[in-house]
């Protein structure tokens, strides 16, 4: 095996090795979740998106530079036409040992169709975004989604052998009363559960995001009224902090970009479906890699230089802040564009 897989070449200014790439493969989605998109979204023209072949080349270049975990996001990644061809082609990096994990975040709507194919491509764990177990509330928060379709998808994923983690965005006045139901359901189904604070990304067409914000400190306190919470030291290199509920033995994660800055151990960068590399989800600075790559179809050297230059600009952390009842640090781009 080449040394590029043993020693990460992408080291940021704070001596963090960048080994995790999150790639949005589409800005399109079959849902319109109220905290993520406006209902009438204008999507990008196809020519601006990286082709599946370009996505392969881009991801393979990052893997050659020491990235060993690849998470595919969107939009909804499974609505991208031909996306299983991309997963199948990435599996060669799992076979070679260069890639340790190939995974995705999904809304679950297409899992019934693709779960077996994903497993066959080497995917072993997936994250499913699900904010409520109530059919009517689900229709309301996703605008277009059907809960039974997602539940069938989760069941198909588990049958296929995929480990499922549920990601739930904490929304004030929406799912506060479902915390215990969600925890009980995940315990019964042996699925991990992570709660996420709502993030200030993009114009939602009049939605009040400060009004949606529910601090996970409050949510933890709510859980503690019924469970004994034991802090776990486990870190996955990601932003989540974990506790164990002693009564059920299950693991619960908390991603708190607003009440805690979780950046000190950040090992990831994000690439949009148009080939912009964001060194930090909460900063606007980015490097546009698409045109560099398209200009040199036979030579990856300029692309590698551009990636290395971008990593050299990775900031220490983000600036999200709701503490003054306004959306400080808000990003102009939608979450669906950067990738969830």
Image (cartoon, helix red, strand yellow):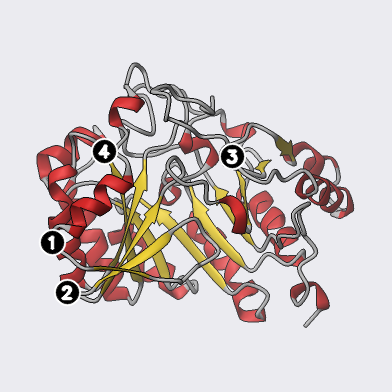
Please indicate whether residue 286 sits to the left or right of residue 221 in the image: right
Is label 2 or label 4 in front?
Answer: 2
Mark number displayed over residue 318: 3
Give the quarter of the image for residue 174: top left
Q: Secondary structure at mark 1?
A: loop
Q: Position of residue 37 (x, y in %)?
A: 38, 30
The earlier-in-sequence mark between 2 and 1 is: 1
Q: Is residue 143 above or below residue 131?
A: above
> Are the residues at dot 4 and dot 3 in contact (C-beta closer than 8 Å)?
no
> Are the residues at dot 2 and dot 1 in contact (C-beta closer than 8 Å)?
yes
Q: Is residue 250 above or below residue 211?
A: below
Q: Position of residue 7 (x, y in %)?
A: 78, 73
Q: Secondary structure at mark 3?
A: loop
Q: Secondary structure at mark 2?
A: loop
Report if residue 266 is visible in the image: no
The residue to which callout 1 is attached is: 226
The earlier-in-sequence mark between 4 and 1 is: 4
């Amino acid at each position: 095996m080449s040394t590029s897989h043993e020693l990460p070449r992408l080291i940021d200014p704070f001596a963090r090795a960048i080994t995790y790439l999150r790639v949005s493969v589409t800005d399109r989605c079959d849902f319109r979740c109220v905290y993520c998109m406006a209902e009438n979204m204008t999507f990008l023209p196809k020519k601006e998106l990286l082709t599946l072949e370009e996505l392969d080349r881009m991801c393979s270049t990052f893997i050659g530079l020491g990235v060993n975990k690849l998470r595919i996001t969107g939009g909804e990644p499974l609505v991208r036409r031909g996306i299983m061809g991309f997963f199948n082609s990435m599996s060669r990096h799992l076979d070679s040992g260069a890639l340790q994990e190939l995974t995705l975040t999904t809304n679950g709507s297409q899992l019934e169709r693709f779960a077996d194919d994903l497993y066959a491509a080497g995917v072993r764990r997936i994250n499913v975004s699900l904010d409520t177990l109530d059919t009517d509330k689900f229709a309301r928060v996703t605008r277009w989604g059907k809960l039974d379709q997602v539940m069938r998808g989760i069941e198909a994923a588990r049958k296929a052998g995929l480990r499922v983690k549920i990601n739930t965005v904490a929304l004030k006045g929406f799912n506060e009363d479902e915390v215990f139901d969600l925890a009980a359901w995940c315990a019964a189904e042996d699925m991990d559960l992570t709660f996420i604070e709502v993030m200030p990304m993009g114009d939602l067409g009049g939605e009040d995001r400060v009004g949606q914000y529910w601090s996970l400190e409050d949510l933890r306190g709510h859980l503690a009224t019924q469970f004994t919470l034991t802090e776990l030291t486990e870190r996955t290199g990601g932003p989540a902090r974990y506790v164990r509920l002693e009564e059920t033995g299950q693991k619960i994660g908390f991603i708190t970009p607003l009440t805690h800055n979780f950046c000190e151990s950040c090992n990831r960068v994000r690439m949009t479906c148009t080939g912009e590399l964001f060194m930090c989800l909460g900063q606007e600075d980015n490097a546009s890699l698409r045109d560099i790559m398209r200009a040199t179809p036979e030579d990856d050297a300029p692309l590698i230089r551009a990636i290395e230059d971008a990593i050299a600009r990775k900031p220490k952390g983000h600036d999200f802040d709701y503490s003054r009842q306004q959306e400080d640090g808000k990003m102009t781009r939608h979450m669906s564009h950067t990738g969830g």
